[in-house]
Image (spheres, rainbow, N blue to C red):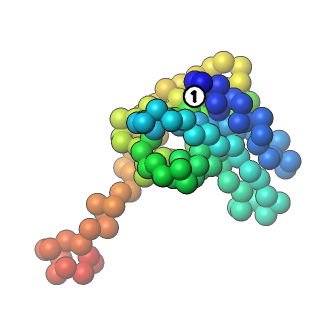
């Protein structure tokens, strides 16, 4: 199954009674396994889950932690980008050169790298204590 097929199929399972904006995401790990996720809304809007986060959670639940490629699809006029939080989540598990393909249900697509999606990414290196700062990280 292709990433497009997996994301398109899982998109149909999205729970989006409030926005009616269904999103599907699929990722492939270096092992070749595909994990998929769809958005799950909640009446308390901030409590919903994005499709990208769902696919990443499925990957981690299965014991994998690296994204080799990812695809996101929605019924939108232009290819839909991940929200800011999902961009950071993707960057947590993908190298900067990993390709993320953004698609519409009408067949448009746009390929970007993780670096394109999230320039200036916050990483664990930013949290490393500096020896020159006295070791307290401040």
Image location of residue 34, percent across then percent down: 55, 35
Image location of residue 111, percent across then percent down: 49, 26
| Residue drawn at 13 percent across, 74 percent down | 132
Residue 66 versus residue 40: which sits nearer the camera?
A: 66
Q: Quadrant of the C terminus?
A: bottom left
Image location of residue 7, percent across then percent down: 65, 32
Specify whether 81 is left or right of 113. right
Residue 92 versus residue 28: which sits nearer the camera?
A: 28
Q: Quadrant of residue 52?
A: top right
User: Which structural element holds mark 1?
Assistant: helix
Residue beneath disc 1: 3
| Residue drawn at 68 percent across, 54 percent down | 49
Indicate whether 24 appears above or below 128.
above
Tag 1: Cα neighbours inside 10 Å, few (<14), some, or many (≥20)? Answer: many
Q: Quadrant of the N terminus?
A: top right
Residue furthest top as drawn: 107
Q: Quadrant of residue 96?
A: top left
Residue 22 versus residue 69: which sits nearer the camera?
A: 69
Image location of residue 116, percent across then percent down: 42, 37
Q: Is residue 107 visible?
A: yes
Q: Is residue 56 visible?
A: no
Residue furthest right as drawn: 17
| Residue drawn at 37 percent across, 49 percent down | 120
Specify whether 6 is left or right of 45. left
| Residue drawn at 76 percent across, 42 percent down | 14
Residue furthest left as drawn: 132
| Total labels drawn | 1
């Amino acid at each position: 199954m292709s990433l497009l097929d997996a994301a398109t199929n899982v998109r149909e399972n999205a729970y989006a009674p409030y926005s009616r904006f269904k999103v599907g995401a699929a990722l492939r790990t270096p092992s070749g396994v595909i994990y998929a996720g769809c958005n799950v809304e909640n009446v308390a809007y901030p409590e919903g889950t994005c499709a990208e986060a769902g696919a990443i959670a499925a990957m981690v639940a299965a014991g994998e932690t690296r994204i080799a490629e990812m695809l996101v699809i929605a019924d939108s006029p232009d290819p839909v980008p991940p929200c800011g939080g999902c961009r950071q989540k993707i960057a947590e598990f993908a190298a900067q050169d990993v390709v993320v393909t953004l698609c519409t249900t009408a067949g448009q697509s746009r390929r970007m790298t993780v670096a394109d999606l999230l320039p200036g990414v916050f990483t664990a290196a930013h949290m490393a204590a500096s020896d020159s700062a006295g070791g307290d990280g401040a």
